[in-house]
Image: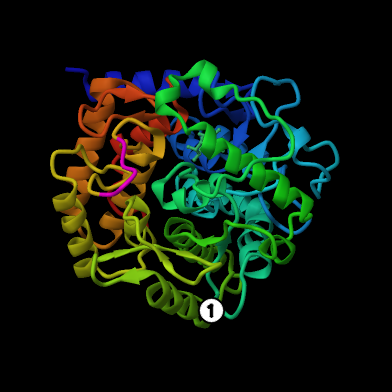
Amino acid sequence: MTSHQELLRRAEQVLRANDVGGAYTRPSPRLYPHQWNWDSAFAALGWARLDWARAAREIETLLLGQWTNGMVPHIRYNPEVTDYAPGPEWWPDVPVRRPGQITSGITQPYVLASASYRVGMLAPDVPSRREWWLNVYDSLVEALLYFPNHRTTGDSPLIVVVHPWESGLDNSPRWDFATGQGRRPSRPYRRVDTTIVDPSARPTGRDYDLYMYLVELFASSHYDLTNYLRRTPFAVHDALFNAAWYRSALDLNRVAAALGRVPAVRQAALAEFRGAYHRTLWDGAVGLFRDRDVLTGRLIPTDTIAGLMAIYAGLVDAAQAARMLARYGERSRGCLPLPSTLPDQEGFDPVKYWRGPVWVNTNWMLIQGLADLGLHREAAELTTRTVDLVRAAGFHEYFHAYSGQGVGGGDFTWSAALVIDLLHGSGSRLR
Ligand code: 2M8
């Protein structure tokens, strides 16, 4: 059996092989050649254990793509790379702050501020930590506040996600209600992903028709939520996305306190957000949070790992977290922990991307939340099972929900980075 040392060595090899010029880490060599938002946040956590300055740089380069309104886009394109679709031609007139930056027009779960807090905590000494936090703090706050300022509707403080790609869990069966409407973009588009990875493990043609339709729609709405909401079939209060934002707000407040600044988000606003999250998304009958279709006002009746992310955010107490996790475990008996979609759900597929396979990043998020809540046994068990999965299969993008076989892209950055972090004991409190 591969020792921890050997696993760490291999994980480091993956990160170094995906390092593009010391500037950013591509998620996977061929499948994802550009810089992705939450991938870079996770990558930084691995780098922080190997080369702290490189971790800091990962976050700084991602922030180079920030927009004038504060949004950090989901992709910062590398102009030298052309074999990814959709390319920047699908995202016209992006309001980047720095001329020359090329980005997509949507964002991703905002784990970046939480990652920046942790990277800062791992700095070699207190002066370097402070100096680096001072460097990135304003950008991180602007990125955080982009959401309450530009991505809410009506009187809810919850954030509206406008594209399945924004959710990070692209083809989750939660989004089938929209895919099923048969929308298509006005122009032909190409796919590269299915020439690299077995198409049976990737989103379908129908999924992509919707993705590209929504790309066109959001771009032609000038990336403005109000314009977009008038015309779209897809706008959701996503349980994972909102949980990630909340945790980033808490973590940024910790940075603010360390820097002697006023909180990034005030207690009253956090309490209001917490209240709305519970009132809007909790489904007592299933004992999980669900996502809400903003257009109909109804909860989307599909149970996935997103429903557990209140644990990551500290939006539930230890007793509720333990109940939620136990129930998820019972409903996914026979699967490796924790499948991205529960196997009793319509649309579950053990091998297809976000419809069932196990992912390292979502497990990692839950491990952090469990540890923070003092659920150390649960955190330790999930850590062991996650590391063992990767040890047996390699640093794949995702893992077959029953067999654990590696699927999707190989040499996948966040699988390596987060295993490095877990092997350094990140499932125990870092405060
Ligand atoms: C996947 O999404 C991209 C689009 O952003 C794709 O399929 O091309 C998702 O797993 C997403 O969460 C991830 O950030 C990205 C890169 O790893 O790949």
The image quadrant where one finds the C terminus is: bottom left
Closest to the observer, 208 or 39: 208
> Is 59 rendered above or below residue 222?
above
Q: Residue furthest right?
A: 99
Type of the residue with mark 1: Ala
Expressed as whole percent of the image width and height from the top left, the position of residue 268 reads 51, 83
Q: Is residue 348 magenta?
A: yes
> What main secondary structure does the magenta stretch of the protein show?
loop
Locate residue 1 relative to residue 71 in the image: left or right.
left
Closest to the observer, 240 or 209: 209
Locate residue 239 relative to residue 373 in the image: left or right.
right
Expressed as whole percent of the image width and height from the top left, the position of residue 143 reads 65, 57
- The answer to which quarter of the image holds residue 420 is top left
Answer yes or no: is residue 59 visible. Answer: no
Q: Which residue is mark 1?
A: 269
Expressed as whole percent of the image width and height from the top left, the position of residue 54 reads 57, 32
Q: Is residue 412 magenta?
A: no
> Is 291 rendered above or below residue 30?
below
Report the residue at 47% width, 53% height from top: 177
The image quadrant where one finds the N terminus is: top left
Locate residue 426 relative to residue 158 in the image: left or right.
left
Magenta-highlighted residues: 345-349
Closest to the observer, 322 or 278: 278
Report the residue at 21% width, 29% height from top: 388
**Element marked by disc 1:** helix
Locate residue 51 relative to residue 302 in the image: left or right.
right
> Is 160 rendered above or below residue 421?
below
| Dot 1 alpha-carbon crowd within 10 angstroms: few under 14, some 14 to 19, many 20 or more | few
